[in-house]
C-alpha cells in the first residue's frame, strides 16, 4: 500500500512483491487477465488506496491476494454480494470483482443475475477458463461441448452458458468480452468497464493449460493462447459478410451498453429524501 | 475516335498505333477501377481494346498494375518498355517503379505524391530504423519525364470529404490528356462507382480536371512531396533492455513462441532467456503475454536523445 507508482506502467508497482511469484500454473491465462486489470487501473490513474479488489474462491479468487490495494477474499460464489455491501457503504471506493466461471455462474449464479439487475457501480471481471481448476478440474457451466473433465469422463453433453447474454438479459448496463491474447484490447475493455457508471460485466476468455488443456489435448500453453485467435469474432467484423475471416463462436468487444440509473446514486437520493441509510 | 472534342490539353494520341495507358498503384487504392473506367471509355470509341491486370496476389498493400491498350488494332495485351503514353500512378514509389515503361519522348506521368510504405520497407522493425523507401524528389523525376503531373490527389480528395476518391482525382487529370468528351467520363464514372459516392466522385473528377487546366496554363502547382523520414521524430529509442526475472518465470514457453523476432528461448533450467539482444525490437509482446509478470521491456533512449 502507498508504494509510489511510476509514470509508465510497471506491473510491479501494483503487486504485493512479497507474495510473488504467484501460485498459478505455468501458462495460466489468469495472469494475463490480471495484468490487463492492473494496466487499466494504471491508465485510469486510480489511487491504490481507493481501489478495492474483491474475489471469490477458485484460481481466479486467489488473484486479489497479489494486488497491492484493498483486497477482499470472500466465500465461494459470493464476491458480488460482499462487493455490493462494500460499494454501498463506501461509494468513494472503486470496486472491482474478480470471479471465475464456476464461481459466478454456478455457485454464485443468483448473486450474478441480481447484481446485474441492481446495476450498482461495480466492475465484474469473469475469468472464463471453462473448468473448475482449483478443485480438480470438474465441468463448469461454460465447459464446451464434448470436452473431457473429471466429472465428464465421456465428454460434456450439457450446453454451455453464454455468460454475456445472461448478464445482458439480467440487466447489466455494460457487457463485454475479450480474449487474453488481445491484451491491449482487453485492457481497453476493462478500462471502459471501470469508467462506466453502473454494473459492468467483462468476460475474459482465459485458458487452463494444466487441468483442462492437457485432458483435452489442446496443446501447450502457447498453442492454447494462440487458438483464441480463431475463437473470436470481433465486434468490428459486424454483420458485413457471412463468416468473412472464419470467425469463431465468441463475439468480442463491447456487446451491450446503456445508461440506466445507477443503483447506489438512486439509493442515496432515496435516503436523503426519506431518511435512513448509512452516511458515506 | 469521336470527332467532336472539347479542348484537348496535351493530347498525345496517335491514330496509327495503339494508345497505351498504364495504371499502377498499391492494392486497395482503386487501380482496377481507374483502368476499368479507362477501358470502358475506350470501348465506346475504339475498335479494339485490351486490358490486362495483375491483382489479388498483391493483396491490400502490394503492387498492383493494369495495362490498358486501345486503338484501331491492338495485338499484344501488355505494354512494352518505353511505350506507355500515360502512366497513372496512385502512389509515388509505384510511379517510380514503372517509369521505364513511360514513353521517353512524349509520355505523361500522372502521379499522386501520396506515399504508402510497403511492408517490406519496414522490414527492420527496431525503433529508430530507417524505412526502405526511395528518397527521389519531384525535380529529379521531372528532368526525365516529358510531361509530369505530380499532385496531392489524396489531399484533394480529403478536402472533398472522402480520401478514397483520390483515384477519381487522378482520372480527372487523365481525362485532360486524352481526346474523349468530358461528359463521357462523368457518365462512365457514375456507372462504375457505388451509388452513394457518385456525387463525390464527380466532384473529384472536376477537381482533377481543374488542377490539370491550371498546369496547362503554365501555373506551377506541383504538390510538395513529403518524403518519409526515419520513424521516431520525437521519442528516439533504439536500444532495448529486457529484464527477465528468473525467480518468477515458470517456463510456460508463451514468450518464446510468441516472439515475432524469435529471439527468446528456454534455457536448461526452463527459464526464458534472450538469445540475441540485437534482434529484440522492444515490441512488448513477451511482456504483455507473460502470465507470471517475469518480463519487463525497458526502452532506453539513445545517447544523442539523452543529450538533447
Image (spheres, coloured by chain):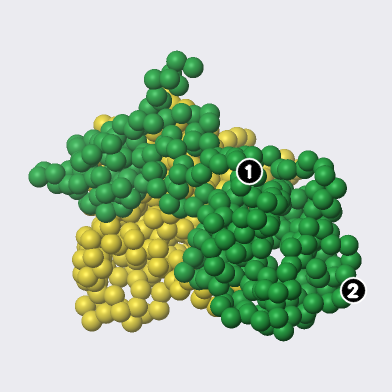
Chain colours: A yellow, B green
Give the total of numbered labels. 2
**Image position of A134 (left or right of A69):** left
* Tag 1 secondary structure: loop
State whether discs 2 and 1 lie on one chain: yes
Neighbour tally class for label 2: few under 14, some 14-19, many 20 plus, Cα within 10 Å: few
Q: Nearer the viewer, residue B49 or B255?
A: B49
Residue drawn at point x = 82 percent, y = 44 percent: B218
Q: How far across and how far down the image is residue A211, in percent?
A: 22, 63
Residue B6, visible in the rendered structure: yes
Residue drawn at point x = 67 percent, y = 73 percent: B17
Location of mark 1 (residue): B143
Tell me which label, 2 or 1, sits earlier in the chain.
2
* Tag 2 secondary structure: loop
Neighbour tally class for label 1: few under 14, some 14-19, many 20 plus, Cα within 10 Å: few
Which quarter of the rendered picture does the C terminus of chain A lie within?
top right
Q: Nearer the viewer, residue B249 or B24?
A: B24
Q: Nearer the viewer, residue B168 or A91?
A: B168
Residue B39, visible in the rendered structure: no
Q: How far across and how far down the image is residue B19, in percent?
A: 68, 70
Answer with the quarter of the image where residue A210 lies. bottom left
Location of mark 2 (residue): B4
Q: How far across and how far down the image is residue A133, in percent?
A: 27, 60
**Image position of B302 (left or right of B204):** left
Q: Mark 2 lies on which chain?
A: B
Residue drawn at point x = 31 percent, y = 52 percent: B258
Q: From what the image shows, is residue B6 above or below residue A79?
A: below
Q: Which of B91 and B122 is in front in this view?
A: B91
Which quarter of the rendered picture does the N terminus of chain A lie within?
top left
Amino acid at each position: 500500500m502507498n508504494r509510489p507508482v511510476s509514470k509508465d506502467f510497471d506491473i510491479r508497482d501494483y503487486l504485493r512483491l512479497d507474495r510473488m511469484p504467484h501460485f498459478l500454473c505455468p501458462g495460466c491465462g489468469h495472469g494475463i487477465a490480471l495484468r490487463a486489470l492492473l494496466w487499466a487501473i494504471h491508465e485510469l490513474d486510480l489511487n491504490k488506496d481507493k481501489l478495492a479488489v474483491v474475489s471469490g474462491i477458485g484460481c481466479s479468487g486467489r488473484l486479489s491476494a497479489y494486488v497491492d490495494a484493498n483486497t477482499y477474499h470472500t466465500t465461494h460464489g459470493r464476491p458480488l454480494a460482499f462487493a455490493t455491501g462494500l460499494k454501498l457503504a463506501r461509494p468513494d471506493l472503486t470496486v472491482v470483482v474478480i470471479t471465475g466461471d464456476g464461481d459466478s455462474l454456478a455457485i454464485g449464479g443468483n448473486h450474478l443475475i441480481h447484481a446485474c439487475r441492481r446495476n450498482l457501480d461495480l466492475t465484474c471481471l469473469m475469468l472464463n477458463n471453462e473448468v473448475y481448476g482449483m478443485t480438480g478440474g470438474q465441468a463448469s457451466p461454460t465447459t464446451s461441448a464434448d470436452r473431457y473433465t473429471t466429472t465428464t469422463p465421456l465428454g460434456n453433453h450439457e450446453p454451455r452458458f453464454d455468460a454475456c447474454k445472461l448478464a445482458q438479459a439480467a440487466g447489466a448496463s455494460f457487457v463485454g468480452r475479450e480474449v487474453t491474447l488481445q491484451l491491449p484490447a482487453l485492457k481497453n475493455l476493462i478500462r471502459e468497464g471501470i469508467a462506466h457508471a453502473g454494473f459492468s460485466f467483462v468476460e475474459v476468455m482465459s485458458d487452463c493449460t494444466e487441468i483442462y488443456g492437457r485432458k483435452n489435448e489442446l496443446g501447450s500453453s502457447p498453442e492454447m493462447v494462440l487458438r483464441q485467435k480463431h475463437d473470436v469474432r470481433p465486434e468490428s467484423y459486424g454483420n458485413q459478410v457471412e463468416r468473412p475471416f472464419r470467425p469463431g463462436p465468441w463475439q468480442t468487444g463491447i456487446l451491450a451498453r446503456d445508461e440506466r440509473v445507477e443503483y447506489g446514486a438512486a439509493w442515496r437520493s432515496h435516503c436523503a429524501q426519506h431518511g435512513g441509510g448509512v452516511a458515506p | 475516335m469521336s470527332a467532336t472534342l472539347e479542348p484537348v490539353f496535351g493530347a498525345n494520341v496517335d491514330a496509327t498505333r495503339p494508345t497505351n495507358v498504364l495504371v499502377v498503384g498499391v492494392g486497395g487504392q482503386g487501380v482496377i477501377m481507374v483502368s476499368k473506367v479507362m477501358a470502358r471509355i475506350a470501348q465506346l470509341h475504339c475498335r479494339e481494346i485490351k486490358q490486362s491486370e495483375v491483382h489479388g496476389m498483391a493483396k491490400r498493400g502490394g503492387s498492383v498494375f493494369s495495362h490498358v491498350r486501345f486503338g484501331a488494332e491492338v495485338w499484344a495485351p501488355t505494354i512494352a518498355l518505353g511505350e506507355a503514353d500515360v502512366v497513372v500512378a496512385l502512389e509515388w514509389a509505384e510511379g517510380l517503379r514503372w517509369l521505364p515503361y513511360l514513353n521517353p519522348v512524349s509520355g505523361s506521368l500522372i502521379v499522386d505524391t501520396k506515399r504508402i510504405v510497403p511492408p517490406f520497407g519496414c522490414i527492420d522493425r527496431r525503433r529508430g530504423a530507417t524505412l526502405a523507401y526511395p528518397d527521389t524528389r519531384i525535380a529529379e523525376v521531372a528532368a526525365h519525364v516529358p510531361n509530369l503531373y505530380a499532385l496531392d490527389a489524396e489531399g484533394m480528395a480529403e478536402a472533398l470529404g472522402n480520401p478514397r476518391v483520390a483515384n477519381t482525382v487522378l482520372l480527372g487529370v487523365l481525362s485532360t490528356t486524352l481526346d474523349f468528351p468530358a461528359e463521357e467520363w462523368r457518365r462512365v464514372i457514375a456507372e462504375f462507382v457505388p451509388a452513394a459516392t457518385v456525387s463525390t466522385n464527380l466532384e473529384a473528377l472536376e477537381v482533377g480536371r481543374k488542377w490539370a487546366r491550371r498546369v496547362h496554363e503554365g501555373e506551377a502547382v506541383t504538390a510538395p512531396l513529403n518524403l518519409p523520414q526515419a520513424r521516431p521524430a520525437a521519442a528516439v529509442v533504439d536500444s532495448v533492455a529486457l529484464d527477465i526475472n528468473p525467480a518468477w518465470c515458470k517456463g510456460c514457453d508463451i514468450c518464446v513462441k510468441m516472439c515475432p523476432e524469435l529471439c527468446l528461448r528456454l534455457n536448461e533450467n526452463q527459464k526464458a532467456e534472450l538469445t540475441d539482444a540485437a534482434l529484440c525490437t522492444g515490441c512488448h509482446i513477451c511482456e504483455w503475454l507473460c502470465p507470471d509478470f517475469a518480463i519487463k521491456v525497458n526502452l532506453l533512449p539513445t545517447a544523442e536523445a539523452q543529450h538533447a
